[in-house]
Amino acid sequence: MMLNDVRMKGFKKRMHFLDVFDVIREHVKCAGSESVSVDDCVSRVTFGDVRAQLDAPPFNKSAVDGYAVLARDTYGASQYNPAKLKIVGECAAGESCGVVMKGEALRIMTGGMVPTGACACVMAEYCEEKDGYVLVYKPVAEALNVCMQGEDVKRGTIAVHKGVRITPYCAGVLASVGCSEVTVFRKPNVAIIVTGSELVESKPKSGQIIDSNSHTLCALVCDCGGEVLSKKRVGDDYESIKGEIVSSDADVIIVTGATSCGKKDYVPLVVDECGELLVHGVAMKPAGPFGVGKVGGKIVFLLPGNPVAACVAFDFFVRFALEVMVGIYDGEKILVKGVLARKVASAVGRTDIFRVKYCNGVVEPVRVGGSGVLSSMIRANAYLVVPENIDGYAKGTEVSVRLF
């Protein structure tokens, strides 16, 4: 291997962990927008502010089964001195109604439109009907038991702000204010290329192993708002890897394996030859052989082949990029504090990422090594990041961990 081989350049001086995010931020762009039905918008991110087309609720409606009244007609009413009001009609939900004047009441059901003139509703439990009149035994204040028009959301106001990941509750609000379609960030198309002549889908023979990375990465891409356009498995062959990368129509290409500096680690060579290798080698563990490049305007992520290293590289770097592309800029990471159950040792000059189990304020390291032990990701539920300027944490130290 020549000393000027691009595979060695990144490893002579690895990039600092935090600097990688700056590179990604500089080269990753928004994926654009599209309109989707309100029924299909959950988990998508709003491309702009969404304004209400209607008031919610669209009219004054009763919050109870009872009687719509003028509040002042009930003042002073009591068990021994009820207000006596003439019943002038009935209104169920979905029906329009007339007018209530002084001394009158209208029988009303929950959700029914409060008639003109009425300003409150009294619950049926506090009333008694007799000979066409209703006896009201408890006074009501103005607007009591009435959902006022626009009290939830007013027409023309912002119902959901830009850059919000839409929850089922957001979808309900949007529907209630007349938004049948929503403009959201488009899902980035992602191509997954898994390298390794030893990888098979099933029934491995001697020297072969089942490919887990492609399945893990497909799920991770969907989890953070992307859409898998293609999934390919190729051997350790320069031309095959090059062909898959160059021919891809995806917005983002993720390649696992063949990213380090071995004889058959062809991915850095392909990216350097066909485009620009922006990052190759990061001062971190696991996932030190991580890289970032651009080929034909497409962003390419170079992930290590070891499953845990691939997961860590994805969770910290690729997830960040995909979330930027779909309009999520705060990362939506959940950080919690806990006390270390035992010591963790780290190397100064390198960011170390530990798999840990967080439970009831206690942080238990699950495994301190083993980039191929994928089951450790099931036993863990958080990452502990140890910065490059310290050599670890003692038992009993309070630390922040990132849940996953």
Image: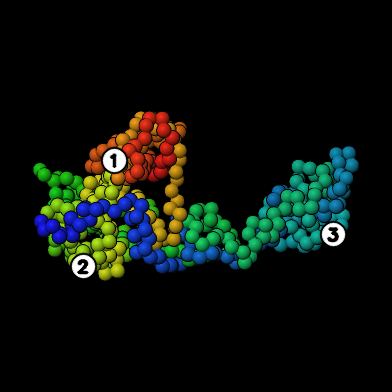
Q: Which label sits on residue 101?
A: 3
Where is residue 353 drawn, in percent x and y?
33, 43
Amino acid on which disc 3 is placed: Met
Give SS at disc 2: helix
**Residue found farthest to the right:** 81
**Residue designated by label 1:** 347
Closer to the eye: label 3 or 2: 2
Where is residue 291 drawn, in percent x and y?
26, 56
**Left or right: 115 in relation to 50:** right
- Give 283 or 93, whichever is nearer the viewer: 283
Amino acid on which disc 1 is placed: Ala
Where is residue 241 drawn, in percent x and y?
17, 61
* Residue name at image x 47 percent, y 56 percent: 165
- Give 191 or 371, whichever is nearer the viewer: 371
Q: Residues within 10 Å of mark 2 (few under 14, many from 20)?
A: some
Which is nearer the N-term, disc 1 or disc 3? 3
Q: Image quarter for residue 251?
A: bottom left
Exactly how many numbered labels are in the figure?
3
Q: In this view, does 87 lie above or below 293?
A: above
**Residue designated by label 2:** 274
Closer to the eye: label 1 or 2: 1
Which is nearer the N-term, disc 3 or disc 2? 3
Which is nearer the N-term, disc 1 or disc 2? 2
**Left or right: 202 in relation to 159:** left
**Left or right: 126 in relation to 110:** right
Q: Is residue 208 above or below residue 269?
A: above
Do the CB atoms of the residues marked 3 and 2 lie less than 8 Å apart? Answer: no
Which scheme is used to colour this image of the protein? rainbow
* Residue name at image x 38 percent, y 65 percent: 29
